[in-house]
Structure formats: C-alpha cells, structure tokens
C-alpha cells in the first residue's frame, strides 16, 4: 500500500511523463507544419520591393517566423536562411509560404549569390557610426541579421564590401529584439523607395 508521500511522487511522475509527451507532440506538429509550408514556399512569388533579408545562423525559433510575417507585410523580395533548421511557422501567420525562401549552409554562399545579382549588403549594429534613417538605401539592398546572442557568423574584416548601419535608440538599454530590428529596417527601406512607384501602394 502506497503512503501519501508515494502517491504525491507517483502523480508528479505521471505529470512529468505527460508533459514530456505533450512537448514531443508539439514539436512533431510544428515540424509537420514547417515541412508543409516549406513545400508550398516553392510557389512563393517575390514581393514588390527589391530588398532581401539574410538570416545568418539565427536560432530556429520564434524570431524567424516573425521576420517572415514582417517581410510579407513590407513586400520583401525574398529571405535567405543561412544554416537555420526547421522552425515552427505558426507565428508567421501563413507568411512562410508566401515570401520566397532560399536556404544556404554557409554565409559565403549567400554573399556570393547576392553580389552576383548586384545587391549591396548591410549589417545592423548599435556601434556603427552611420544612422539608418540618415542614409540613402540602395535600390538593391540585402540586410544581414545575425544570431540573437552571438551575432554574425563572420568577422566584418572578412567582407569589407558589407556596409554597417545603426538604428537610432534613445533608451538606456541599446538593444532591440532582432525581429523588431528587422521590421524597422524594412519599414525604412519602404519609406525611402515606395514613393518612387505609387502603384506599389495598396489602395
């Protein structure tokens, strides 16, 4: 016969097993959604604006999906995912299947592709002297966003052709979530270039 202490321990173990099972089922469902939407992404069409977002070794999580959502809203041409595994596309609200995605193992592959196509690459860093809002952005522009904790997978001196801009901030903590930073830079690009073609604006 079990004591009350044993019963509590047994119930805790059952809850733990259930929790592990639920987490496993949740991961499996997220993977299934990812595979389904990745296949649909093959039919995605470029957005009306000629900027590209490069996600360099970012965590395969919430931020990736949120960036797809913003990229669809701002009409991005495409997104490059560099060494990023499967992620749950749910926070993207269907945008993962609408914004063309290109997959690369290493940053140098994405870099070479973008340079061949005539794109100017730009990183974002609070320490950069040039401000995003005071700098004319080129028509063919690719914004490179790094890992949330470790930054970019490359050293700046390895790619002297890559520019660097900062987003003006006025608080004591000069740190923006990477998905927020991506939205800011996409908005600024559209602000500068949308006026060149009024037909791009939604009625």
Image (spheres, rainbow, N blue to C red):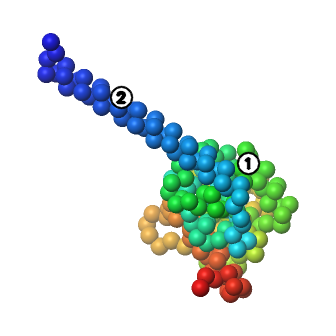
For this rendering, which residue is in front, 201 or 161? 201
For this rendering, which residue is in front, 146 or 70? 70
Q: For the N terminus, which image quadrant?
A: top left
Determine the residue located farthest toward the top in the rendered image: 1
Tell me where residue 122 appears, x and y as whole percent: 70, 65
| Any part of residue 1 in sight | yes
Occupied quadrant, residue 183: bottom right
| Any part of residue 66 in sight | no
Tell me where residue 24 appears, x and y as whole percent: 46, 35
Occupied quadrant, residue 20: top left
Q: Which residue is depicted at the point 45% across and 63% down?
A: 173
In the displayed structure, does residue 162 sit left or right of residue 192?
A: right
Tell me where residue 134 appears, x and y as whole percent: 64, 80
Q: For the C terminus, which image quadrant?
A: bottom right
Indicate which label's residue lies in the foreground, 1 or 2.
2
Mark before the other along the chain sequence, 1 or 2: 2
From the image, tell me which residue sits under label 1. Answer: 104
Q: Which residue is depicted at the point 64% across and 77% down?
A: 190
Q: Which mark is residue 74?
A: none
Q: Secondary structure at mark 1?
A: strand
Q: Residues within 10 Å of mark 2 (few under 14, many from 20)?
A: few
Occupied quadrant, residue 73: bottom right
Q: Which residue is depicted at the point 24% across and 27% down?
A: 11
Please tell me whether residue 28 is drawn above or below residue 161 in the rendered image.
above
Q: Secondary structure at mark 2?
A: helix
Q: Which mark is residue 17?
A: 2
For this rendering, which residue is in front, 32 or 138? 32
């Amino acid at each position: 016969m079990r004591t009350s202490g044993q019963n509590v321990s047994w119930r805790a173990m059952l809850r733990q097993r259930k929790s592990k099972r639920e987490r496993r089922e949740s991961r499996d469902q997220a993977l299934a959604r990812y595979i389904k939407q990745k296949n649909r992404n093959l039919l995605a069409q470029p957005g009306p604006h000629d900027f590209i977002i490069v996600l360099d070794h970012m965590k395969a999580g919430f931020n990736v999906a949120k960036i797809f959502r913003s990229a669809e809203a701002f009409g991005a041409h495409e997104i490059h995912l560099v060494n990023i595994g499967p992620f749950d596309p749910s926070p993207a609200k269907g945008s993962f299947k609408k914004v063309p995605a290109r997959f690369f193992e290493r940053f140098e592959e994405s870099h070479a592709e973008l340079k061949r196509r005539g794109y100017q690459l730009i990183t974002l860093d609070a320490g950069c002297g040039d401000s995003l809002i005071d700098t004319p952005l080129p028509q063919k522009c690719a914004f490179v966003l790094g890992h949330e904790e470790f930054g970019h997978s490359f050293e700046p001196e390895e790619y002297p052709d890559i520019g660097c801009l900062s987003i003006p901030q006025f608080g004591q903590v000069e740190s923006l979530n990477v998905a927020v930073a991506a939205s800011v830079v996409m908005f600024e690009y559209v602000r500068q270039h949308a006026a060149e073609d009024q037909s791009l604006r939604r009625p």
